[in-house]
Image (tube, rainbow, N blue to C red):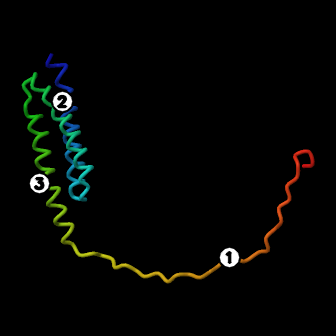
């Protein structure tokens, strides 16, 4: 049974770490919806990593949990650092253009029956 559940545990821990990275980036950018979805996906990966416990490998669960804790700490810290950085570019004003299309005389439309085409 351990030989069956061990690869599932590795895949689950990998999913959990990837979702934690996505959550950290989402928190750094201020995208709360994406962060919530990533944490929801992390839960699935963490539950899958629990299956490695049948082989006695509980460190996979620890890695999954540590990844989420790191994401929840580093994401908001990165957001705070990003907000403190000065803006690198200033807005540029663009002058409106007044080019108009050439005016043409309207053409008359003549409808012909299908038999005359």
Residue plotted at (23% across, 39% down): 41
- Vertical comparison of 76 with 58: above or below: below
Alpha-carbon neighbours of circle 3 within 10 Å: few (<14), some, or many (≥20)?
Answer: few
Question: Badges 3 and 1: C-beta atoms under 8 Å apart?
Answer: no
Residue plotted at (17% across, 19% down): 3
Residue 93: x and y in percent read: 43, 82
Residue 114: x and y in percent read: 87, 46
- Vertical comparison of 46 with 99: above or below: above
Question: Badges 2 and 1: C-beta atoms under 8 Å apart?
Answer: no
Alpha-carbon neighbours of circle 1 within 10 Å: few (<14), some, or many (≥20)?
Answer: few
| Residue designated by label 2 | 48
Q: Secondary structure at mark 1?
A: loop
Residue plotted at (24% across, 44% down): 38
Query: Which sits earlier in the primary sequence, circle 3 or circle 2?
Result: 2
Q: Residue furthest right?
A: 116
| Residue designated by label 3 | 73
Which of these two is toward me, 41 or 111? 111
Which of these two is toward me, 98 or 14? 98
Residue 112: x and y in percent read: 88, 52
Q: Along the horizontal axis of the image, is 110 left or right of 56?
A: right
Question: Badges 3 and 2: C-beta atoms under 8 Å apart?
Answer: no
Which of these two is toward me, 27 or 104? 104
Of the numbered discs in the image, which one, if any, rests on residue 101? 1
Q: Write down the quadrant of residue 27 in the picture.
A: bottom left
Q: CA distance from mark 2 to mark 1?
A: 64 Å
Q: Along the horizontal axis of the image, is 40 left or right of 108?
A: left
Q: Secondary structure at mark 2?
A: helix
Give the mark toward the camera: 2 or 1: 1
Alpha-carbon neighbours of circle 2 within 10 Å: few (<14), some, or many (≥20)?
Answer: many
Q: CA distance from mark 3 to mark 2?
A: 23 Å
């Amino acid at each position: 049974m351990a030989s069956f559940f061990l690869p599932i545990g590795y895949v689950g821990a990998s999913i959990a770490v990837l979702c934690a990275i996505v959550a950290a980036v989402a928190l750094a950018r201020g995208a709360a919806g994406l962060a919530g979805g990533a944490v929801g996906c992390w839960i699935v990966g963490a539950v899958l990593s629990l299956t490695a416990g049948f082989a006695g490998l509980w460190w996979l669960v620890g890695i999954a949990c540590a990844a989420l804790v790191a994401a929840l700490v580093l994401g908001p810290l990165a957001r705070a650092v990003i907000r403190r950085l000065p803006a690198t570019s200033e807005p540029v004003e663009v002058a409106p253009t007044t080019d108009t299309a050439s005016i043409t005389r309207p053409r008359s439309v003549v409808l012909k029956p299908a038999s005359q085409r």
